[in-house]
Amino acid sequence: MHGWGGRAGEYFDYGQNLFDNLIERGDIPPLIIVSATFYNENSSRDFGSSIQEFREFHRDFETHLMPTVEGQYHTYAVSTSPEDLAASRDHRAFGGFSLGSVTTWLQFCYDYDYIRWFLPMSGSCWYYGTYGDFRFEENVDFIEQLVKDEDLAERGYFIYHAVGTQDAVKSQSVNMADEMLHRPDTFTPDHYVFYQKDGGYHDFNAVLEYLYNALPLFFREDV
């Protein structure tokens, strides 16, 4: 998922060679990559409207995006019924940058039944609060309780959280990570890791490194 003001397909503008090379070298298996958007044709691109749009994206994902893609291509889902899509969650990942990272956290909060692997890049969870009102403890409390209530440690989940040391908005990621890493009994290294790119900025160069490091950790045969 793109960030503020982005568009569908933009990951293929700067990531296509990375994806192709990772597959060709055998670092990741052949897979379907969807470069989606939380905007629609009539969406305003201002910041406030963008926040409203990504907060509703999980509904579009469940109702339209996931069934459409998996109904058109051969995937691990036997059908596009909610039950079969949930049964194939081990073979589905979601990631995003900036506001797309915030969207990724919300996907974890809403769509853990359908997704096992998560890649939030340069952004924290805004299930509670918003930009400038970062309720880190409250959000991590919610995520921790969700993990326990839904038995996600046993069912399996993995979050690769990343940000650059020179990222203009790194503090929200660092503070979120600090809160999670202070709960090691819940967020073990098998379920959550935090990576900081030395000298990394809030840009696509950093995103490419995060993708390069994280994607080979998803869909592993030993899981």
Image (cartoon, rainbow, N blue to C red):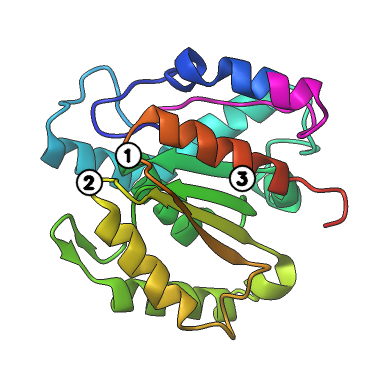
Amino acid residing under circle 2 = Ala
Residue type pointed to by label 1: Tyr
- Give the x, y percent position of residue 106: 40, 54
Marks 3 and 1, the one that precedes in the sequence: 1
- Assess whether mark 1 and mark 2 are in contact (beta carbons under 8 angstroms): yes
Res 153 quadrant in image: bottom right
Q: Residue furthest right?
A: 222
Mark 3 or mark 1, which is nearer to you? 1
Secondary structure of the residue carrying tag 3 is helix
Give the residue pinned by disc 2.
Answer: 168
Q: Position of residue 192 (x, y in %)?
A: 57, 65
Q: Which residue is mark 3?
A: 214
User: CA separation, marks 3 and 1?
Assistant: 18 Å
Which span of residues is magenta-colored? 21-37
Report the disc number at residue 106: none
Residue closer to the observer: 177 or 154: 177
SS assignment at label 2: loop
Residue 163 visible in the current orientation: yes
Give the alpha-carbon distance from disc 2 to disc 1, as whole Å: 7 Å
**Who's the residue at 61% across and 22% down the image?**
18
